[in-house]
Amino acid sequence: MDRFTRLMGPDNLQTSGVMSNVRLRKKRKKKKKKKKKKKKKKKKKKKKKKKKEKKKKKEKKKEKLS
């Protein structure tokens, strides 16, 4: 019995290739989730900047009118 059959047991044997594919697939999914979170944070920052710009424009208009 080699190392792999001892780890898996004789009834649920899988080739090492299949196992590594499963591991890679899981890693890929985790990376995608992290990227999505980063994008959301960037969008929030942009919104705040836009709000600040609008406030500045309104203040300038008030000064001109007065």
Image (cartoon, helix red, strand yellow):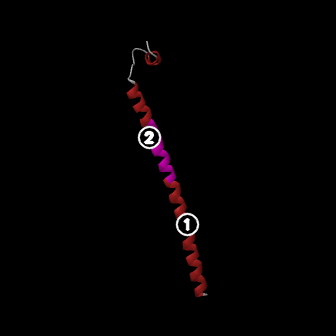
Dominant secondary structure (helix, strand or loop) of the stretch shown in magenta? helix
Q: Nearer the viewer, residue 66 or 2?
A: 2
Which residue is found at the position 47% from the left and 18% from the top?
A: 7
Q: How crowded is the residue under tag 2: few (<14 C-alpha within 10 Å), some, or many (20+)?
A: few
Check residue 36 in the rendering and tell me which mark sits there, or answer none: none
Toward which corner of the image does residue 23 lie, by quadrant?
top left
Q: Measured from the top left, where is residue 22 in percent x and y?
A: 41, 32
Q: Is residue 63 above or below residue 45?
A: below
Circle 2 is placed at which residue position? 28
Sequence-first tag of 1 and 2: 2
Toward which corner of the image does residue 48 lie, by quadrant?
bottom right
Q: Which residues are magenta?
A: 26-38
Q: Are marks 1 and 2 in contact (CB under 8 Å)?
A: no
- Quadrant of the image containing the C terminus: bottom right
Q: Nearer the viewer, residue 38 or 24?
A: 24
Is 5 on the left-hand or right-hand side of 46? Answer: left
